[in-house]
Amino acid sequence: MEAYETNMDALYQEIILDHYRNPHGRGLRDPYEAEVHHVNPTCGDEITLRVHLDGDRVADVSYAAEGCSISQASASVLNDLVIGRTVDEAMGLLDDFTELMQGRGKVVPDDDPRRDRLEDGIAFAGVAQFPARIKCALLSWMAWKDATAQAFTDHSTSDQGENE
Ligand code: ZN
């Protein structure tokens, strides 16, 4: 049984390493409504992240990231998960992912109901065992949340008379 669990951990670690080696959607792109720079000083991870919204839909999330494999893989998974969703849906995924990171490693990824929604993001369940790494996993998500909030603030002045 223990060997089986170890194998599962290895599988999920491989998913994280795949994203690290082949990050999805990396690079900073135009157009964008907001850009933020977030740092995780405990590990030395940094990310510059831009959001482009199309109405209430996430049209693009582009980024340049430096740091550990977990922080970079997390940015890649974020990119996969939120582009094309409405901001509300994407914020729901942020909540799911944050909850997963607060699971103290007790979440069993195979059985977790969030698995369908978080896709490869569920691979980070094991990271939650290591308090020092939780901020690595959350860095890109916090940057995205911040940038999205700023994008909305900048556009809120034009709420009136907006026709769809
Ligand atoms: Zn890190």
Image (cartoon, helix red, strand yellow):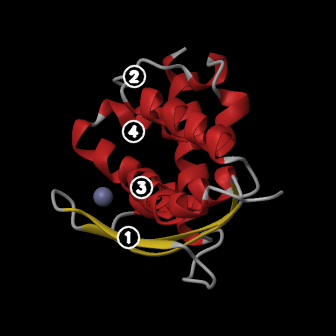
Q: Choose top left, top right, bottom left or bottom right for residue 80.
A: bottom right
Label 1, secondary structure: give it: strand
The answer for how far apart the CA atoms under marks 1 and 2 are is 27 Å
Q: Residue at x 64, y 56 (%)?
A: 160
Q: Choose top left, top right, bottom left or bottom right for residue 54.
A: bottom right
The answer for how far apart the CA atoms under marks 3 and 1 are is 19 Å
Precedes in sequence: disc 2 or disc 3: 3
Residue holding disc 3: 70
Q: Residue at x 29, y 47 (%)?
A: 135
The answer for how far apart the CA atoms under marks 2 and 4 are is 10 Å
Residue holding disc 2: 103
Label 2, secondary structure: give it: loop
Residue holding disc 1: 36
Nearer the observer, 7 or 118: 118
Quadrant housing the C terminus = bottom right
Precedes in sequence: disc 3 or disc 1: 1
Residue 162 image position (x, y, % from top left): 72, 59
Nearer the observer, 160 or 25: 160
Label 4, secondary structure: give it: helix
The answer for how far apart the CA atoms under marks 3 and 4 are is 8 Å
The answer for how far apart the CA atoms under marks 2 and 3 are is 17 Å
Precedes in sequence: disc 3 or disc 4: 3
| Numbered label attached to residue 146 | none
Hey, what amino acid is under mark 4? Val
